[in-house]
Image (cartoon, helix red, strand yellow):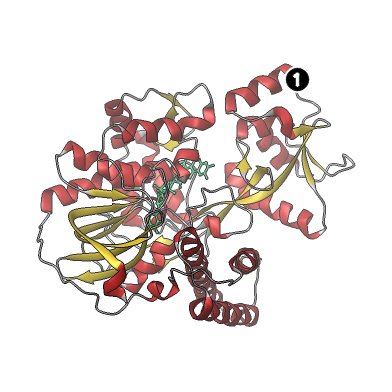
Amino acid sequence: MEQNITSVEHYTPILIVGTGISGLTVAYYLSKNNIKYTITTKKNAPKQSNSFLAAANTRVPSENDINNIINLTIDKCGADRSVIETLYRNSNTIINFFEELGISYEKTSFGIMPECMIKSQGGKKLINGLLQHIEQPLCNKILIHLEKYAHGIIALFYDIQLDQFIRIYTNYLVLATGGYAAQFSYNDNSPGSTGETLILAKKIGARLKGMSTVMCHPWSIYNGRQILLGGVVSLSQGKIVDEEGIQLLKDKYICDAIAQDDYHEMIDEILHFQLECIKQKKDMYLDMSHANENLLNERFKKYGFSTNVVKNKRIKITPTMHYSSGGIEINANGEAINLNRVFATGEAQFNGDLGMGRIPGQAFASGIVFGKLIADKIANEGVFNTQYPFSFKAPPETMQLYSIEDNDFPIEEFQKELSTLMVDLLAPNSSIASLTLHKRKIQKSQNMILGRARGSGKRYEDILTLFFGHSVALEIIEDLEVKACVKG
Ligand SMILES: Cc1cc2nc3c(=O)[nH]c(=O)nc-3n(C[C@H](O)[C@H](O)[C@H](O)COP(=O)(O)OP(=O)(O)OC[C@H]3O[C@@H](n4cnc5c(N)ncnc54)[C@H](O)[C@@H]3O)c2cc1C
């Protein structure tokens, strides 16, 4: 079966999967060194990524602050020392990167961001700039299987548009595939952030860490789909009220911090407060009644939000899943631990397993710094060998889910159930017994999917997302079990 439908074979010395800031930065520095590579994305345009949606506020600590930031990220977020030292001791790369690309920037409270008319569009500007300097990405190709050999890796893709499987052999694989926050029911991510490549990397020997560490953002509108930036939220002066206008947030210290757009160190407390409101079935609103109308209109315009969300001088808010911090453990070169020639960069890396897992602005900083380090390492030490095996060691499990004829397996129903369950998993103080129950349920559903769900094209992609979503949920449980054991 596998021989019949794997219709295209390729060799490429370096394969980058993912066209967000991390993948494009690796491609940019390889192009600069005239090194050949292939870059792919599962989406139908390279711009479909979290990076494109982001403001690209990028952390660049001042020389004097580097040690503080390193220690803070280790103590509060659980980062690996060698990785985080590498990131911040090389953060001068970021300024050079912006300047080389000709992207003007402005200083922010913790770093720099592209200068834009609309502040939330910094990521768009960076991604558009990078796309002009790199090889044309191959689109619509979803990575569905990996096999590791001594001198390289075989990557199996499915082309969603051409309904075709493609085997690519490469000497170096760079996984720049982002995180898995889009598997949760409320999230503001690009829909491609579903985490399947983390599971594939684990299957060939990578170590995953911190998978239960995710960041929920307190200020979202449109049922979680968009987050409000602090400059707009601050206009509420920290007044969070219920439907009757009664003040819900009473801690003056937190209210003041929100009013001054300096609440980032208190997000845990804010989320805790929100969770209590949700438990008590209380809707939450930012009270904008004290904001000067002209200032409000001007801020909304500047940050790229529509004032339509302000109703009766209030904005309805909910927390939303904003990013994931668990991922592939790497060394200071960005190479996966235990897995030579396989690199992980950006949100696919393990960032940290405490608190929010990373600090604001770290994602773009890390994508840029590790993008350069990975490209430099391959450029300096690359050993290329075009001889490779012509069959898989074992038939890929994910191919079982493919069929030219679609069936009526209820994918949406399963997806809805999974995304809600993912949120439940993270409820504080889940007991081992409840985690075990969840685990059994997830395993049972996943077996049903493997046994019954079939399709091709977009439907096959949805089945794959669902299948891997179950694996991500199991990884989250495993991580929670480890944390519960450590706590005793
Ligand atoms: C609204 C929003 C605002 C943000 N603002 C900031 C900010 O100001 N500063 C900051 O530092 N961070 C910010 N973040 C976080 C930051 O945007 C992300 O962490 C970062 O962009 C991740 O970059 P990445 O390149 O690792 O992944 P992404 O940008 O998510 O790109 C992942 C790529 O991998 C591809 N891919 C995934 N799986 C597969 C597969 N199986 N096969 C093929 N291709 C695959 C995707 O299609 C995509 O091209 C924000 C996030 C959001 C959602």
Q: Residues within 10 Å of mark 1 (few under 14, many from 20)?
A: few
The residue sitting at the right extreme is: 244
* In the displayed structure image, the side of residue 195 where residue 390 appears, left or right: left
Residue 435 % position (x, y): 60, 77
The quarter of the picture where the C terminus appears is bottom right
Is 280 placed above or below 204 here?
Answer: above
Helix, strand or loop at mark 1: loop
Pointer 1: what residue?
292
- Nearest the eye: 465 or 281: 465
- Nearest the eye: 406 or 199: 406
The residue sitting at the front extreme is: 405
Residue 83 % position (x, y): 33, 54
Residue 13 % position (x, y): 16, 54
Is residue 88 visible in the rendered structure shown here?
A: no
Is residue 3 visible in the rendered structure shown here?
A: yes
Total marks in image: 1
Residue 382 % position (x, y): 12, 54
- Nearest the eye: 427 or 472: 472
The residue sitting at the top extreme is: 294
Q: Is mark 1 within 8 Å of ligand 1?
A: no
Q: Residue at x 38, y 36 (%)?
A: 127
The quarter of the picture where the N terminus appears is bottom left
Is 101 placed above or below 193 here?
Answer: above
Image-quadrant location for residue 66: top left
Q: Residue at x 88, y 42 (%)?
A: 246
Q: Residue at x 49, y 31 (%)?
A: 121
Q: Residue at x 70, y 23 (%)?
A: 296
Identified by mark 1, the residue type is: Asn
